[in-house]
Image (cartoon, helix red, strand yellow):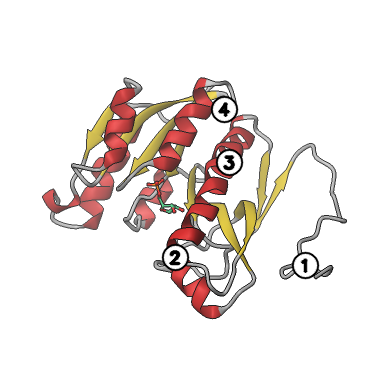
Amino acid sequence: MIRIGVLVSGSGSNLQSIMDACERGGIDGQVAVVISNVPDAYALERARDRSIPTVVLSHNDYPDRSAFDRELAITLKEYRVDLVALAGFMRVLSDEFLGEFPGRIMNIHPALLPSFPGLGVRRKAIEHGVRFSGCTVHFVDAGVDTGPIIIQAVVPVYPDDTEEELRDRILALEHKIYPKAIQLFAQGRLIVTGRKVYVRGFDKDAAQCLVNPPLDI
Ligand code: GRF
């Protein structure tokens, strides 16, 4: 059973999917602590509803990034976490912090990386006119949304999509792939070699394919 520390800043729907998966046995682990840098984040309420310990560390209370990150690392260690899961956590983490949890920090991003890193990515995907977007769970490295990719899910994008439509379409899959990535980690099935993440124990399906618009229209 792994102990997971979840870092949040907002609504916490991904946190919810992780807590739900732990509860129904989809993740061999438990959420040991939820830490928010935003005092009134709704994610905190979701955690309290499940009687999961919550901690608020407001970055405004610290003189600089490294002081904040130090406190964050200390708190996560107090709760003896094996994995740090960023779930809508709107802060860039310092190299010092990353060094405290090598290979043990994950993030979810609402686009198919390496396309559309950073912020405002659903709008950017629609404006660019891509036919597919999706979501990515990756290990965190020193860059912004650049770390080794663990799992991705794909959704179609339509020229007349609103940002909300695309957000909801992607979010539904985020809630599936994040718990899955964490479970693969918990099962010790992720092997990182440079940029590549090998997943132990599944067969390739080279016939998998999506076309948008479909070929038969
Ligand atoms: C999600 O879209 C996630 O991909 C991004 O931030 C959002 C968090 O949503 N990193 P929630 O707080 O989990 O509902």
Q: Amino acid at mark 3?
A: Lys
Q: Amino acid at mark 4?
A: Ile
3D distance between C-alphas at marks 1 and 2: 22 Å
For the N terminus, give its image quadrant.
top right
For the C terminus, give its image quadrant.
bottom right
Please, is residue 193 above or below residue 121 in the view?
above
Mark closer to the chain start, 4 or 3? 4
Labelled disc at residue 27:
4
Instruction: Say left or right for 207 vs 182.
Output: right
Asked whether disc 4 touches disc 1, contact meaning CB atoms under 8 Å apart, the reply is no
Residue topped by disc 2: 163
Q: Which residue occupies the extreme right position in the image?
A: 207
3D distance between C-alphas at marks 1 and 3: 25 Å
Q: Amino acid at mark 1?
A: Pro
Labelled disc at residue 214:
1
Residue topped by disc 3: 176
Viewer-side label of 2, 4: 2
3D distance between C-alphas at marks 3 and 2: 20 Å
Q: Dot 3 lies on which element?
A: helix
